[in-house]
Amino acid sequence: MFKTVRPIVAGAALLATTSLSAFAADPYVPPPVEPQPPVVYEEPAVDYGGWYIRGDVNYHWSRLRSTQYITYGPPAGTASFTTTDLRGAWSAGVGVGYQLTSYLRTDLTFDYWAKSRFTGSTTGVCGGVPCVSTDTSAYQALLIMANAYVDLGTYHGVTPYVGAGIGGARLRWDNLRNTVGGITTVHRGAKEWRFAWALMAGASYCLTNKLELDVGYRFTRIHGGRMFDFAPTVGPGFDGGMNVHEGRAGLRYHLGGTSNRCAPPPPPQVIDYIPPVYK
């Protein structure tokens, strides 16, 4: 009986060994996986161009560069105020502008300067006796400026900038009242357009994706011109122009879109990773 079983067992062992060798020589090969296209990171389209409107409320301080007037003799000649003083006053402005690039923008502004009170004095001789006069007036102005600004980058919503402008000022002087020894002489105030230029610096802050708070400083130089007209024995008078220092605060509102620097950042791109499957 054992003689009969032994060939059967040997045959089964040989068959099993052959099958294992066949499986070992022919491993499982997974089906080919098509390569995925490369991931391309695209920057979001940026359009820096856009119109905006602005409004400002301001306070300015003026200083006359010089003030002279003509006297009629005897003796005839040119004299100047001994002292001059201009008080500060409020001002307000509006404008329209365009954001050219991320760093450059321009606008056209219209500002009204409320009356700044003028007080001055002169010294001279009245009837052979030294005398001192008191002079009062005021000026107001309409300022039209074409401006260009360089934005210096945005940091946590704050964008510092510098700028310059060129334009004109419609300056209007009130009548000058010259009082000496209780007697007042009135000189009619002059009004005229004058050349003006300005330098600015400040910073804006993003309130929303369309609205910015703008706080800054502006220095304006207005060229000289006539201050008052002739009255008996004195006039006309001229000022040599003025330097105006102005603190400004206002809002800029972007039309038809958003301010690029105030827009929220794009959401991060999520890439689904699918690991390979091995069998």
Image: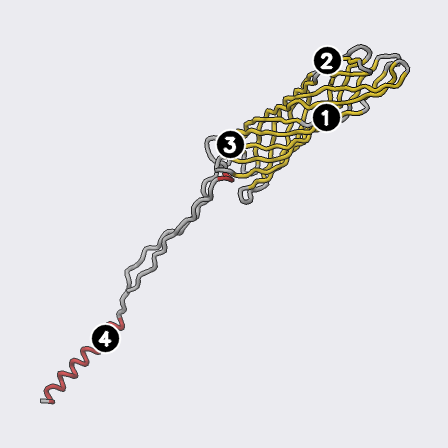
- Asked if residue 18 is positioned above or below residue 237 in the image, the reply reads below
Query: Is label 4 in contact with label 2 (beta carbons under 8 Å)?
Result: no
Residue 78 percent location from the top left of the image: 83, 18
Alpha-carbon span between mark 3 and mark 1:
34 Å
Specify the quadrant of the image occupied by residue 236: top right
Mark 3 and mark 1 lie on one chain; the one further toward the N terminus is 1
Give the residue number, with chain letter if any, for mark 3: 253
Mark 4 and mark 2 lie on one chain; the one further toward the N terminus is 4
Amino acid type shown at disc 1: Leu
Give the residue number, with chain letter if any, for mark 1: 86
Alpha-carbon span between mark 4 and mark 1:
109 Å
Mark 1 and mark 2 lie on one chain; the one further toward the N terminus is 1
Residue 36 percent location from the top left of the image: 35, 53
Amino acid type shown at disc 2: Arg
Kindly identify which numbered label has been placed on residue 188: 2
Mark 3 and mark 4 lie on one chain; the one further toward the N terminus is 4
- Few, some or many residues within 10 Å of mark 2 (<14, 14–19, 20+): some
Nearest the viewer among 35 and 52 is: 52
Mark 2 and mark 3 lie on one chain; the one further toward the N terminus is 2
Front of the two marks 2 and 3: 2
Specify the quadrant of the image occupied by residue 226: top right
Give the residue number, with chain letter if any, for mark 4: 20
Kindly identify which numbered label has been placed on residue 203: none
